[in-house]
Amino acid sequence: MDYAQRMRALREDNDLLQKEIAEVLNTNQKVYSRYETEENEMPIRHLIALCKYYNVSADYFLGFTDTPKPLPKK
């Protein structure tokens, strides 16, 4: 699974709309939609924000592992 598929799956598994996640990223729905369709590359700051939001590792988000390891607690 590539990162765009994982991004969409995480959003849908949490019953969220693209617009809601776009607000988390301080962007608009159209920009976010382009990330999910891989029309635009997602900036690293958005990757970090989404990993924190969903509490998953970047390895999971990017598709390097299928184990959604939570982020370590500070």
Image (cartoon, grey):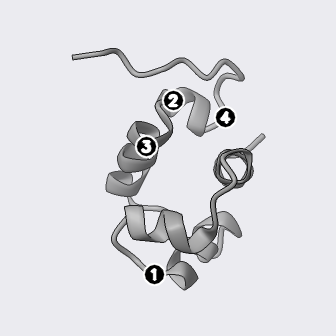
Q: Position of 71 compared to 19: left or right? A: left
Q: Position of 54 compared to 65: left or right? A: left
In the image, what residue occupies the spot 37% across and 52% down? 44
Residue under numbered circle 4: 63
Q: Amino acid at mark 2?
A: Val
Q: Residues within 10 Å of mark 1 (few under 14, many from 20)?
A: some
- Return the mark for residue 56: 2
Query: Are the residues flagged by discs 1 and 4 in contact, CB closer than 8 Å?
Result: no
Q: Earlier in the sequence, mark 4 or mark 2?
A: 2
Residue under numbered circle 1: 28
Q: Amino acid at mark 3?
A: Tyr
In the image, what residue occupies the spot 40% across and 22% down? 71
Residue 31 on image: x %, y % = 51, 79
Cα distance, mark 2 to mark 1? 23 Å
Cα distance, mark 3 to mark 1? 17 Å
Residue under numbered circle 3: 53
User: Count the marks: how many?
Assistant: 4
In the depicted structure, whether residue 2 falls above or below residue 17: above
Cα distance, mark 2 to mark 3? 8 Å
Q: Amino acid at mark 4?
A: Gly
Mark 2 or mark 3, whichever is nearer to me: 3
Q: Residue furthest front?
A: 15
Q: Amino acid at mark 1?
A: Asn
Cα distance, mark 3 to mark 4? 17 Å
